[in-house]
Structures are given as structure tokens and as C-alpha cells.
Image (cartoon, helix red, strand yellow):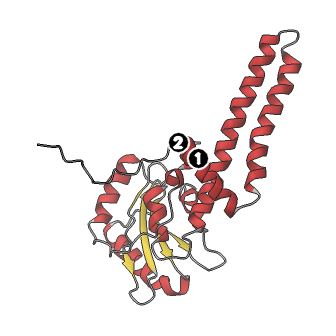
């Protein structure tokens, strides 16, 4: 009995690490034409510093000069990757800025270390799709309004009152992501969360997170597509 060939298509092979980095570089370059110059500067400056230090400090030792040059190259590669990560993060989030669920994408992929949050909002306006998200970390509880402040203010105030009833001694901060001039840009939201003054330790963060999660389950709001490059966690790897 003849064997039958498996006609099912093979799953597409994921691109390698270098190819992924090249794709991220191309996407970033298309979004920000100045990114190439910043990345070049991030590579060249440490290399020049390493070369200069090698000439000044190694004396007649060729081996010492080579070591300084190698150190400069490695530092330049690191500088290149750090700048690429930051620029790629900004480019990735710029593609979904203004879409419903954009804040949820940030909370899902790039929360600062020690913070917890859900990609699902805790409140949403069915008419306008404006939403309020919640994150818990060292700064306490942070409510994040997505949309114009004039339309999200009532939802933010309602959530603040709910939290104050069960956690009267925990600070509740508010951030706004939207079209208003004072709003936090989407790509800076993660870093802005990390700037809050410490009010809770690790154990308290866990307890507060469980407590506020018991209030209710957030409504379902789809996360917009388009956020990935390298999982958009460049600032943590750097």
C-alpha cells in the first residue's frame, strides 16, 4: 500500500534574530528619517572614544590598543541597539496611537518592572470608545484615561471613588493619553509610570493589585494590531 504524502502546508518559519533586527531597522527608518543618523552616532561615538583612549593609554602596546578598539566597537554596538530600541518603540506605538485599545497594548507589552496592569479597560464608553485603564505599582494605583480628558473625566472620577472606598490609604494617580496638549504620548507612557514616587513595596503591590482586581472585570476592548518589534521592551533590555 503506497504511502500518501502529507499535503498539509508547513508552518511558516519565523525569521532569525538578525532578520528581525533588520526588519525593525527598516520600519524605524521609514517612520523617522533621522533615526539612522542617531544610530550611526550611537555607534561611532563610543568607537572614537575607545580609539582615543587606546592611543593615549596603551603607549607602545599594540595589544592594549587593540583591546581599547574592541571595547569601543562593543560599546558602539550597544549604543546602536539602545537607540534602535528606543526609536523602534516610538515608531511601533505611533502606528496605533489614537486607536481604541492602544493604552492596553502598552500595559500588555512594556510595563515597568514591578508594575501590574491589564490590557482590558476597567471602564469604557460604548458610544465614543473612550476608556479608563488601571495599573498598580510602586507609585500606588494609576488610572489612565484614553481619549479626550473632557470625555473620560467622569469615568476616572467614578473609578477613583471605588478605589478610595476599599483602599483609603493608597495613593491614586491619574494619567491621560489622548489628543489634549498635556496628555502623555503613548510611547512615553511606560517611562512615565516609572517616575511616580515610591509608595508601595513589593508585597503591598501584590495585595493592592488583588484587591482592586476584585472590584469588577473590565469590558472587552480589542488590542490594535501593529505593536511588536522585538516585543517593544527595548528600554528594559538596554
Q: Residue at x 75, y 60 (%)?
A: 33
Q: Residue at x 34, y 75 (%)?
A: 162
Q: In front: 140, or 17?
A: 17
Q: In front: 145, or 10?
A: 10
Residue 187 versus residue 43 in the image, above or below: below
Disc 1 on helix, strand or loop? helix
Name the residue tied to disc 2.
Answer: 17
> Which corner quadrant holds the N terminus?
top left
Q: In front: 60, or 25?
A: 25
Name the residue tied to disc 1.
Answer: 21
Direction from residue 132 to residue 62 in the image, left or right: right
Direction from residue 211 to residue 182 in the image, left or right: right
Residue 72 versus residue 186 in the image, above or below: above
Q: Residue at x 52, y 50 (%)?
A: 230
Residue 184 versus residue 89 in the image, above or below: below
Q: Residue at x 27, y 53 (%)?
A: 7
Where residue 104 appears, x then y in whole percent?
Answer: 44, 67
> Which corner quadrant holds the C terminus?
top right
Where residue 172 appears, x then y in whole percent?
Answer: 45, 67
Given the current orientation, which residue lies at the most extreme top position?
60
Amino acid at each position: 500500500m503506497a504511502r500518501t504524502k502529507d499535503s498539509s502546508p508547513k508552518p511558516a518559519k519565523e525569521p532569525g534574530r538578525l532578520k528581525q533586527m533588520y526588519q525593525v531597522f527598516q520600519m524605524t527608518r521609514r517612520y523617522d528619517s533621522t533615526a539612522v543618523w542617531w544610530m550611526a552616532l550611537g555607534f561611532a561615538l563610543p568607537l572614537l572614544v575607545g580609539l582615543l583612549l587606546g592611543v593615549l593609554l596603551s603607549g607602545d602596546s599594540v595589544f592594549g590598543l587593540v583591546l581599547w578598539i574592541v571595547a569601543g566597537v562593543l560599546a558602539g554596538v550597544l549604543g546602536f541597539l539602545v537607540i534602535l530600541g528606543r526609536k523602534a518603540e516610538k515608531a511601533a506605538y505611533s502606528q496605533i496611537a489614537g486607536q481604541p485599545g492602544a493604552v492596553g497594548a502598552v500595559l500588555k507589552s512594556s510595563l515597568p518592572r514591578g508594575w501590574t496592569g491589564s490590557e482590558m479597560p476597567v471602564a469604557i464608553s460604548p458610544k465614543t470608545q473612550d476608556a479608563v485603564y488601571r495599573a498598580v505599582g510602586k507609585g500606588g494605583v494609576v488610572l489612565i484615561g484614553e481619549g479626550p480628558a473632557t470625555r473620560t473625566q467622569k469615568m476616572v472620577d467614578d473609578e477613583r471613588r471605588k478605589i478610595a472606598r476599599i483602599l483609603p490609604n493608597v495613593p491614586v494617580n491619574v494619567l491621560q493619553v489622548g489628543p489634549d496638549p498635556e496628555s502623555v504620548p503613548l510611547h512615553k507612557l511606560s517611562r512615565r509610570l516609572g517616575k511616580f514616587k515610591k509608595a508601595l513595596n513589593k508585597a503591598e503591590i501584590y495585595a493592592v493589585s488583588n484587591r482592586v482586581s476584585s472590584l469588577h472585570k473590565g469590558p472587552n476592548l480589542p488590542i490594535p494590531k501593529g505593536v511588536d518589534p522585538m516585543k517593544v521592551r527595548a528600554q528594559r533590555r538596554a
